Amino acid sequence: MRKSILLGSVAALLVSASSLAENIHFPEEFVPLQVGERVIESSIFSRVDDVELAPGTYQLKLKYTDLYDLGYDDHEVIESEPFWVNVTVEAGKDYTLVFNRAENAVAAKVFAEAPQVSLKAKGSTLAEPLNVIAERQLQSSQFNQQASETPAGPQKPSRPIKPIAPINGKGMPSAANMLDFWWQQATLAERQAFLDKVTK
């Protein structure tokens, strides 16, 4: 009896946890590298095709990589530099990253220089084009912004980026991982407001 109650409670928790996150599916030509400052761990043997995110707006770091046949037993891998896109995830919607795949390696090289991608909600006929920001553009603008601004104290504590377990459709992240993720995104004022709320 206790065992069935416990299993029912665990199942209810899993259902409620999975309802907090929506899914973005990536085609095989795109590798998700980061969500904000969080690195997504993947490898040749453990590829991440799906990323689950709570509703909200995120910066995703991606890389385009594609294989083209050039002739008999000859092929070429075309890759882009890492780039960033801003995505907005709405509650109750799952998404797919979509793009127009180049017909040949020459066109793929052109695409890799300036990738164009869109986010399509499942069941929708329209895809929303995403603004692509190259990694070098982002670093250059951050450097220029830091050089021109007078420091007024950090809004967020500076911490090195640390890898986390993949956030994907193969397994929900734990509540502790999700809490840690949101804690890292919060400003000092938001953290203090949260601490005040939970210690009352």
Image (spheres, grey):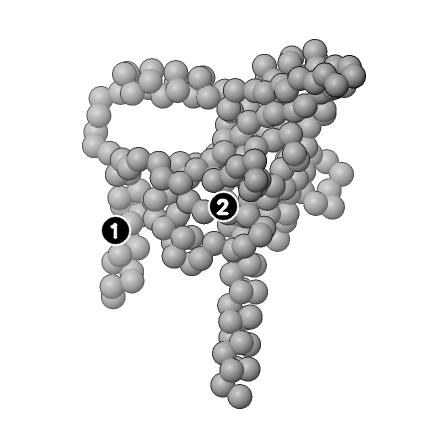
Residue at (26, 56) in percent of width and height: 195
Residue at (29, 62) in percent of width and height: 198
Which of marks 1 and 2 precedes in the sequence?
Answer: 2
In this view, the residue farthest toward the right is 72
Residue 100 image point, x, y percent = 72, 25
Secondary structure at numbered mark 2: loop
Residue 65 image point, x, y percent = 61, 25
Query: Which corner quadrant of the image does residue 113 belong to?
Result: top right
- Whether residue 90 appears in this view of the structure is no
Give the distance between the C-alpha atoms of the residues marked 2 and 1, in whole angstroms: 28 Å
In the rendered structure, the answer to whether residue 56 lies left or right of residue 188 reads right
Is 165 or 184 nearer to us in this picture? 165
Q: Look at the picture and state if 15 lies above or below 148.
A: below
Circle 1: residue type: Gln
Residue beneath disc 2: 166
Is 126 or 80 nearer to us in this picture? 80
Q: Look at the picture and state if 111 lies above or below 177.
A: above
Residue at (27, 45) in percent of width and height: 189
Picture mark count:
2
Residue beneath disc 1: 192
Quarter that holds the C terminus: bottom left
